[in-house]
Every structure is written in structure tokens, then in C-alpha cells.
Amino acid sequence: MTKIISVDETVNGIREDLKEWSSKFLSVHGRMPSLVSIIIGDSKEADVYAQSKVRSGRRIGVEVTARNIDPDLGQKKIEDEIRKLSDDSRIDGIILENPVPKELNYISLLSCISPLKDVDCMTPYNQGLISMKSQIVLPATAAAVDQILKENFPEVRDVAIINRSVVVGKPLSMILLNRDCTVTVCHSKTRDLRKKCASAEAVVVAVGHENFLTRDYVTDNSVVIDVGINSTQNGIKGDADFDSLNGFVRAITPVPGGVGKLTSIKIFQNLKLLMDRSA
Amino acid sequence: MTKIISVDETVNGIREDLKEWSSKFLSVHGRMPSLVSIIIGDSKEADVYAQSKVRSGRRIGVEVTARNIDPDLGQKKIEDEIRKLSDDSRIDGIILENPVPKELNYISLLSCISPLKDVDCMTPYNQGLISMKSQIVLPATAAAVDQILKENFPEVRDVAIINRSVVVGKPLSMILLNRDCTVTVCHSKTRDLRKKCASAEAVVVAVGHENFLTRDYVTDNSVVIDVGINSTQNGIKGDADFDSLNGFVRAITPVPGGVGKLTSIKIFQNLKLLMDRSA
């Protein structure tokens, strides 16, 4: 029997917590906690991300504002804009949505966000704190995967991650190391990926390809954490071949409704963590 | 036949380079490049580290000054001191030597070092840049191991690291990932350490125990990078059982004279990299 991992209880718990917090904040400060989502240029993708946060914010009691910035302002003026938002005491959190036009220096823009408003954990400073085991926040996806593993399989200590990005693979590997897991970080250039995955107790897959992770990569003792969100003709699908793995592996997260669901609310949990720290 | 990896040529090359750079700097600026090594309290260990940098600096043409700070000044005043050094245009690089008294907040102290003077790559900002693949400098030991692997075994792509610290394991794993290696990070809590090590092409060991890495952990195709520096009755020894591995593995670094030798000069290479960036 494969366990289909549900995040519903966890997500509901976090949401109730956040609602209580935001309504307390409102009554004390006369305004809702506020999050600004910066979109540079007109990217449909960035807009979708921002609008989804606006909707989630409404349910929780956080005011999320999408702020469009004209890329033609140029690097320096955009940095000034972001610094102004960082200095604005009425703004509690800031996210720079992806993609950012390529002619701009992304890292320099990120560095203008105050680490204490960095709900996405994308400033170099906050990324470095993870390495130093002193983080206040974590990138939402990495935090979601870690929480799912910790809550459901605290005994799992050997994890393979197929992803080496700054939002999933790298921070997740450090978080897992910090709590005594052994971690193998794999990617598109990994030679014996199947062997690496099959020899771990849990496999975290984030490759962006539907049905990528098949039975060849796992054993009947594997826990599969599917980070993939692929739009297909049959709706949103993960990176794991769910139908073939279900009934074979030890446990698996569903897509949609698994990692993604927990990830969306993590941004708001980060907002609370940062505001508690600033207070 | 086991290859005993020599770093001599590499180290000599870097040293000649640095000498030329420092003497040019002296002739243009009327002073040597300068590095301040901060010692908080009276730790013999910190003092040894600082004095060894003073000596290395002399050979290269960099003025290294040990600066003692009284821990009784307290967190705030010590932070002010470090900030003053960071703002001083006659000081090009700053290192905070370990150990730092436990009653002080180490991360906060580190954060007062300007990332552009952080020759040890220990500020959260510079650590985060590694994760983001945008680093200017790297922690010296991690940089040394990476360079040895890259120069001698560019084809090696599967590396096991026995260390998860912020100076070796974590940054090294990210550097290796950034150049397409697959990395398994292991530590004292790793369950099947021998298997993890034996299935990699290279093993980086930094555990602080003489003769820790024996034949059980490797194959005749293994490259062993020994980061250990253990003071024993028989002199300085590494973490690998050198005598038993020599003749068995593919290659191994000697201790002393291997990783440590390259590491010492990396601090000064970092100084140059940061000064080039600031210029």
C-alpha cells in the first residue's frame, strides 16, 4: 500500500494560525500586514504569480499589492525603487517576481531587498544564513519539502534531490544536512541517476518533465516528493509517473495538492517569521 | 600506481602572481595591500592562525596585522570596531579568527565585515552568493579542494564529501554542483558511509581523525582529497590512512603539503579578487 501524502491538515493549521496573527495585527496597527509583489516589465508569468499571491493574501488577511516597474528605468533607478520599498515602514514583505528582464542584474536587484522583508528568501544574505544554520526564513518550496519529510517520515535520513537550483536543490540540501540527513544532489548531468535515487530512502524530484520519475528510479521502500508542476492536456501533472508509482513505492505526494499547496502558504508564514523578528 | 597529488606548481604559480600584483600595488599606492586578522580574547589557536598569516603575507608582500579586541567590550562595541575596520580605506581585507568567545553572536560579528573585504568568505552575503552561482570569493579550503580536483581530474563528476560545515562541506558541494558534479554530503550521522564513499569517484575527507579513511571506504579507482590536519606524536597527519591507501587508490593528496598548502595561499588570492572587484 502506497501512502498518498496529504498536506491538508498542515496547510489548514498554518492558515488558521496566520489568520489569527493577521487579525491581531490589524487590530493593533490599524492595517493589514502588507506584501508587495514586484513585476518588472510585462511578463504574463510574473503576473500570474503575483495574482495568485493577491488571492491567497485575501484568505489570510494579508494585503498583497502587485507593483509594476518599467524596465526602461534601468538598473540604478529600479534599485532605488526597490530600496524605497525596503525602507517603507508600511510595507512588511517584498517579492521580486520571476522572470526579470535579462538585461538587468538580478542579484543586484535582489540585494536591494532588506533581508527582514525578504519573504522569498532570495537575498544573498538570507541564502547565506541557511548555509550557516542561522536562517530566519527558507525558500518556500524547500521549506515545504522539508516539512513534509519531517512530519511524515522523521526517520528518513538519506535523501536524493534531483534539482540543483537556488530555490530547491541547494537550500534544501543544506536544511536536510542541518538536521542530520545525508544528501545527494543530482541534476541533468548526473551519470547514474537511477542508482543514486534508488539507493536513497526519499527522492525529491523537481525537473519540470511530466512522468520523468518512473519505477526504474525507486524501490518499494522509497518516499517520493514530487515538486513538479507541469501544465499538460490532462491538467496539472507532477514530475513523477504517479499512476505507475502508486501501489509500488512506500509513499508519494500528489500533484496538484501536494508540495505546491504547502509552498503557496509558506510565503505568508515567512512574512510572519520576518515580522516577528523585526518586532 | 597511486598518484601522489602535488600542489607545488599551483602554489608557486599563485605566489608569483600575487607577488607581482602586490609590488605593482605598492608602487602605485605607496603602501602594501593590507589584511587585518581580528582576535577576540586570548585564544592561542586564533593567535597561531593570525601569526601564520603574518608570515605568509611577508613572503607575498601583503601587510598582515593581528588586531586584538577585548571581549569585555561587549557585542555592540565590538561590532562598531569591526565596522570601523570595514570602513577604513587603508584596510583591504578582514578576517575574524576562530574561536570567538561563545557569549558573542558570531554571525552578527561576521555581518559587520564588508563583503568586499571578506577574504575568508564568511559573511552571510558572500556565502549566499555561492548558492546563487555569483560568488566573488570562496572559503579557502573549499576553493583549494575544488582547484585540486579541477586541475588534476577534470573528468571526475561524482564526489562524496565527509564534512557538512560552512567552511568545507556546504560551500564545496555548491561549487562542485555549479560545475556539473553530482555530490553526496556525508557526516558523522551518515548510516552507510563506506558505501557512499566507495560509490563516488572522489572522496573529500575532513573529519579531524587520524587514519579515519581506510581501504574500506574506497576502490582502486578512488581519488582521495585529504583535508585533515591532525597534530600527532608522529607529526602532522591527515584524515586518510595514507600508508595503506598509497598503492591502492587512484590518487591521494599528501598531508602535510597538500590541501593545507594550497589553502593558506587562497586567502591572499581572495584578497586580490576582492580588491580587483572594488577597484
Image (tube, coloured by chain):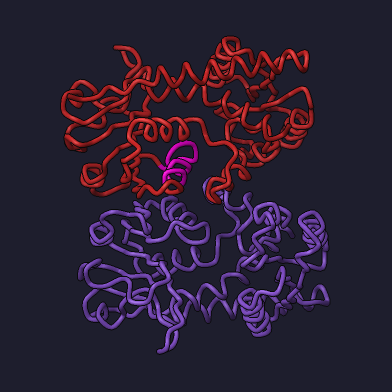
Chain colours: A purple, B red
Q: Which residues are magenta?
A: B164-176
Q: Nearer the viewer, residue A215 or A102?
A: A102
Can you tell which quarter of the image residue A228 is in?
bottom left
Using the image, determine if residue B80 lies above or below residue B243: below
From the viewer's perspective, is B50 left or right of B142?
A: right
Q: Position of residue B235 (x, y in %)?
A: 33, 12
Can residue A19 be seen in the rendering of this structure?
A: no
Q: Position of residue B171 (x, y in %)?
A: 48, 42
Q: Quadrant of the C terminus of chain A?
A: bottom right
From the viewer's perspective, is B44 left or right of A72?
A: left
Using the image, determine if residue B1 lies above or below residue A173: above
Q: Quadrant of the N terminus of chain A?
A: bottom left
Q: Nearer the viewer, residue B28 or A106?
A: B28
Q: Position of residue A276 (x, y in %)?
A: 68, 62
Which residue is rendered at x = 63% and y = 72% of the image? A268
Which residue is rendered at x = 63% and y = 40% of the image? B105
Using the image, determine if residue B191 lies above or below residue B246: below
How many badges with numbers are in the image?
Answer: 0
Q: Position of residue B215 (x, y in %)?
A: 17, 32
